[in-house]
Image (spheres, rainbow, N blue to C red):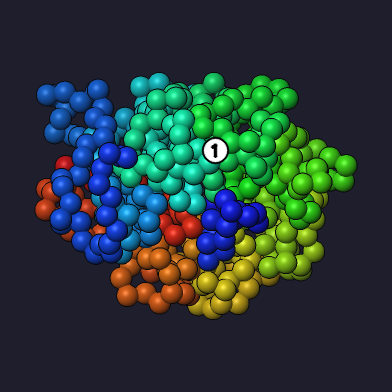
Amino acid sequence: MALVRHSSVRNQMQSMICLLPWMKVTRHIASSSAARNKVPILYKSSEINDQNKKDVVMLQIFSWGRGTSGQLGVGTEQTQLYPAPVVNLQVLPSSFVLSPTPGQLVNKDHYSINKQVLEVGISCGLFHSALLVDGNFWIWGKGDGGRLGFGHENPVFMPTLNPNLDNVRCIALGGVHSIALTSLGQVFTWGYGGFGALGHSVYHRELLPRLVKGNWNGKIQHIATSGAHTAAVTESGELYTWGRDEGDGRLGLGPGRGPNEGGGLSIPSKVNALPIPVAAVSCGGFFTTVLTEDGQIWNWGANSNYELGRGDKVGGWKPKLIPSLEDVRIIQIASGGYHSLALTDEGKVLSWGFGGHGQLGHSSKQNQKIPMVIDALADQRFVYIACGGSSSAAITDEGKLYMWGNAKDSQLGILGLPEVQLYPVEVKFLVEDDDLGAHKVLSVAVGASHAMCLVLRSS
């Protein structure tokens, strides 16, 4: 997730810099989930039977932070001070895998997984959220612009199945739009189209998922989006981008091929300047980063806050390597509004860019010119990273979740933090009287002012 520069709808996006309808909605601050009803079971695997039911594990979705648009999925407009369960999924231990995540290298075998293995994933947009389970997705939060894809612009306050698209492999939420990748390698987008981020050659909103008709050959296997631009990677490693540019070069298209006079390009265009195939992409606020199969990072776009990690403030549309990382293999990248994280194959977390909200984790508000290992995380092995507009998160191989950065809206899920949290702190989960085991975090998604995580718990 990241931000954009625009008016009315655009004004919603400025908070990124610090980056069911029939229910009665209330506004309050919640510090406990005890008053809520029992957590609903949203999904139960069809493979569960009398013989294996003792092996069933629970996947739980937790949310926290600002909920004034219903993005927490708990039926209210509350602010949740720490993680609270939203829904449960009952599955067998060997029956699920995480869906592909924007910016993350995926084993090629993942794209031909057994159809009996269900994929599970989460995503946070500016003020909306989504859960992907077995090809279907549930979505909720603010509805302006049609970003929920239900055919209307009303808010939705609990996870609600979207019946308008299935066979989804990956979902990524932007500022006021959404993007999905299907098992057929097709890209669908919906929501506010004024930035060109939908890729439909027109700039109006789409209230329902609509197929993006790009001129690429073959299937798309990886997608990413941010506040105002979108990217897709083909099976052969070609990168296509579309959306807003504003002269910073974030689309990587060069002179004569970039946005029109309004600053938007609604037609997917190939990034010809990339000299090698890419495997993953992440969209930041005003910059774009890609990852090759061998773990090399290339990036381009705005660089006034050292977003590109090259040691200077020279930006532009030409993709370039990060010099200090040429001998390091990166397996995941994550982009915020003005900062980035990278995860090495040895489980180290690096950060660079703007540090004014503590999102770099170096116990300082200073900007970081080149990628630097976060010392506070150096004694553990990490397997997953995520960025919000101005906050960051990382998960260890033991399933512990750490967060840092902007805590103004309780989006770090920890009581008593200052608004600027300069170093990583572990997110703790309340011990619920639910007869389930310890919390093992599998993935995390961070928006502008809220966050979600997927947690594994044994019965």
The residue at which mark 1 appears reads as 191
Q: Which residue is drawn at 36% across and 56% down?
A: 67
363 relative position to 271: left or right: left
Q: What element carries label 1?
A: strand
Q: How many marks?
A: 1
Q: Nearer the viewer, residue 338 or 292?
A: 338
Q: What amino acid type should be assigned to the residue bearing mark 1?
A: Gly
Q: Residue at x 24, y 64 (%)?
A: 31
294 relative position to 360: left or right: right
Q: Which residue is drawn at 58% across and 41% down?
A: 192
Horizontal and vertical percent for residue 231? 65, 40
Residue 74 versus residue 352 in the image, above or below: above
State whether residue 291 appears in this view: no
State whether residue 1 appears in this view: yes
Horizontal and vertical percent for residue 188? 56, 29
Q: Nearer the viewer, residue 242 or 25?
A: 25
Residue 352 versus residue 443 in the image, above or below: below
Horizontal and vertical percent for residue 25? 28, 50
Q: Which residue is drawn at 41% across and 40% down?
A: 154
Task: Estimate how packed mark 1 is, as few (under 14), some (14 to 19) or many (20 or more) residues with alpha carbons within 10 Å.
Answer: many
Residue 306 versus residue 381 in the image, above or below: below
402 relative position to 260: left or right: left
Query: Looking at the figure, which quarter contains the C terminus?
Result: top left
Horizontal and vertical percent for residue 201? 71, 31
82 relative position to 223: left or right: left
